[in-house]
Amino acid sequence: MLYKLMREPLIHFLLAGFLLFLYCKSCSSATGVDDEIEVTQESLLSYMQYQSKAFNPDVFQEKFEQFSASEKEEMVQNYLRDEALYREAIAIGLDQNDFVIKRRIIQKMEFILDDFDVSDVEIEADSLEAFYDSNEQRYFRPKLYTFTHVYFNSAGDTRARAAGFLIQHGSQGMSASESLPYGDRFLYHRTYAEKTADFLEGHFGSGFVQALDGLLPDEERWQGPIESDHGTHLVHLSQRDPASVPELDEIRSVVEADYLSHLRRQHQQRKIQKIVDRYKVVEDL
Amino acid sequence: MKYLYFSLILLLIAGCTDATKTSDQDAAQIATAEQDRKDVTRNENKNLYWGDTHLHTNYSSDAFLFGTIMASPDEAFRFAKGEIMTYPPTGEKIQINRPLDFLVVTDHAEGLGTMLKARNKDELLMSTEAGRRLAKIVEGKPGIPMFLKWLRAKNLGETGLTEIDTGQVMRTIWEEHNQYADDHNEPGKFSAFIGWEWTSTLNGNNLHRVLFTPQDASVADQFLPYSATHSSHPEDLWQWLEETTERYDVELVSIPHNSNVSGGLMFPDDQDSKGQALDVSYAKTRAKWEPIVEITQIKGTSEAHPKFSPTDEFANFELWDILLKSNGGKQASRSNPQRADFVRYALQDGLKLEESLGENPYKFGLIGSSDTHTALSSVEEDNFTGKNLMDGGAADKSASWIYDIKHLDFSAAGYAAVWAESNTRRDIYDAFIRKEVYGTTGSRIQLRVFGGWDYSQSELDAPDYVDTGYQKGVPMGSDISGSNGKPLQLMIHAAKDPKGAHLDRIQVVKSWVDAGQPVEKIYDVAWSGDRQLNAAGKLPPVESTVDLKTGSYDNRTGEAELSVIWEDPEFIADKRAVYYVRVLEIPTPRFSTLAAVKLGEDPWAGADPVIQERAYSSPIWYTP
């Protein structure tokens, strides 16, 4: 959002105006108003974008080029009018005590203070670990199951059909997609990726999930048969991730990103505090 | 020397501005919606995702006034993802039974976020006359009196919405609002969308729409949300969509809701909201921007009405007839239902208009969503946090909300179900556009529908029936033609909510036009048990297992799974027709009954003690 602010011509105007104001104050010239207004295509493009509260240079460039001579002239006149009034207003201090301007300038200041360059930061292992330790609960993961199953409904000789599949394909590492045409249609899914026990209990019943806990993950082998609320299943259990807070190494990039944004906020907060501290506070509540 | 100093500063600023501009533009181009699915596994046969495209937080003026002060979009996303939250009125811990896969926070664009800012005496807002007036209104304790005070000011035009909605304050708020969605979006895990509600109420008649985009804040920040302050006419909204999507390269979809209280204005068959006769350009424009309609939500269903569908024994279901206007008395203004208020008749009139205009304005898919004003999307009967923060507790549910409207008049509904390749903004949004979505009244019934000409029973029974479904036909939400003398088939598969009740039946609702008159017919096509159709061709009701004393039910009736290949017995090859599928659960206790049981009371009068939750598929359109 702050990057966005930076694109806004209003910010450019305000900041330039603010600096101009400071400058005029410091040089205490007679009128304080710069009496030369330069009209360039760039300034007009900025002006157009601000007018329509939309910021897309290419679109406006195109629009500008399509303007007729009279439309261009009208645009220039409007621009001159606004620019002259703006400068006069600044000169007589109308920007003082205006909360809209005040808020915008504060936002700008916050933006400038948010100058924490992440590319410069060497993350120290110790600090990252300390951050990870104190924010552990943020990374908690429940137990997750990843498997494909072949389902046999209770019609026909279920056990024999399951046994037949095991004999033919049980240990040949048949992939999940190859197994799709086998067995009967299951009412939900064939493959479950990183699903929780709670989710699976809805689809299979709790007995199935308990049985699943009794198997060891195996990339090659089809296991079972195990029973669900709906029938009999052979399972290709490729992964079972225990409930855990993942090791730092596993999610290092995520933690690093969180840590950097933490540093960034801290950094900005410190800079703001420094500025606040420079002021003598006179309380009169 | 002074000049030099000044120029240097300007140079510095110019330099840093330009650099930022370039890198920011690059970033904006990279951060397109396509990008967010690049590392995500996609399933060409589509996975089922559950979400809510209609939810309000403290950024909505009315939600705020009803007491949703603490719950921002951040809380809304956290709750939807399954985090445990504190329920503000009681301090109780609450949690959704099952997390959602996606959420669109759609706060009212009118005065978006300004209550919050007024309450906090935001300097920027307080610098406006309108802001100072708002601050007066929101002093004290939120509730009905505060809401009415605001409504009065609004009706008198004293809230200064025009000034606010188009001003600099709104830009800041809109950017804040969008940031929440970007922060919560996790490709592959949870899709958080940027959206809003356009709240047009023409003379108390509801013409509301929610809008959302698959893109991120860098795109959405470029415009301000179109509000009813700009115009109350949907035709103007579509015009704005035309211009805005073109100008900023943004994708947007508009979803009408609560047509049930639109005073006959939501789905007109003669003239638009400005009195112009409908023409081909109206039909094209509408179909382009509004490919989806919300059929069920907390303020009732908009499917059909017994007045117009007297032979549909399930049409008298969770109806809502309260208009958004005061008649000056102590009673709510109630609507006189009209055909143009309901989805089924719009689908019929769409066929009629297609014949006369050459285009169908009402070629839309169907979803459910909540429209909750609590930021908490839980429309589960046993975990319904209510419409406002006034009806979360059991004791509150029998109380009056406003005038003679009671909290138990609300409906614990609904959700949007989406068949998409992955859980990313891009894939979910695309499913909305191709209408491969459906709506439920809150239950998570799984439903697949394919239209085709030569599906076989053995193909439906096969474990890879979905492959066949796509290969030999089209999924829900599609057009189909080319019958070659064969009748249309629908291949339908429904499975019960994995944690819910068994299924009672599958129905096909078919509509066509005969001699200029719309005709509808409802077929029972698959059902549980050994029930037989009676002489009138009706299937007897399924036995209820609900115990009204304990608020429990069991699954000894119904089936976990129903499926069928249905062949239209009255197929007319040279007539347009539209088909949608309705799946009914066995009866379960309604939320109001569960609340009464909790308090040790009998089910309350004024509401059905049981409910048959249901799913509505998006239609399939047959064109000769």
Image (cartoon, rainbow, N blue to C red):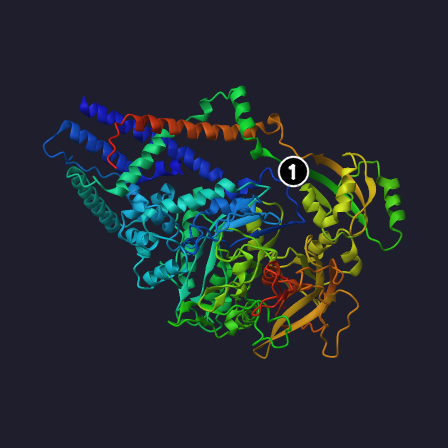
Which quadrant of the figure contains the N terminus of chain A? top left
Picture residue at 40% right of the left edge, 64% below the top: B233
Q: Is residue B174 left or right of residue B600?
A: left
**Closest to the observer: B610 or B256?**
B610
- Is any part of residue B369 visible from this angle? no
* Extreme residue toward the front, this view: B600
Image quadrant holding the C terminus of chain A, namely top left
Residue B333 lies in what quarter of the image?
A: bottom left
Task: Tell me which amino acid carries mark 1.
Answer: Pro
The picture places residue B142, in percent across and down from the top left corner, at 40, 54
Callout 1 environment at 10 Å: few (<14), some (14 to 19), or many (20+)?
A: some
Viewer-proximal residue, A62 or A175?
A175
Q: Position of residue B414 (x, y in %)?
A: 57, 58
Corner quadrant of residue B345? bottom right
Can residue B495 be spotted in the picture? yes
Q: Residue B86: where, in percent of width, then height?
A: 52, 46
Q: Which residue is mark 1?
A: A142
Please tell me whether residue A189 is drawn above or below residue A135 in the rendered image.
below
The local secondary structure at tag 1 comes to loop
How many numbered tags mark residues here?
1
Label 1 resides on the chain identified as A
Considering only vertical position in the picture, is A249 above or below A69? Answer: above
Q: Residue at x 31, y 47 (%)?
A: B125
Q: Is residue B215 above or below residue B264?
A: above
Percent of width and height locating residue A213? 76, 38
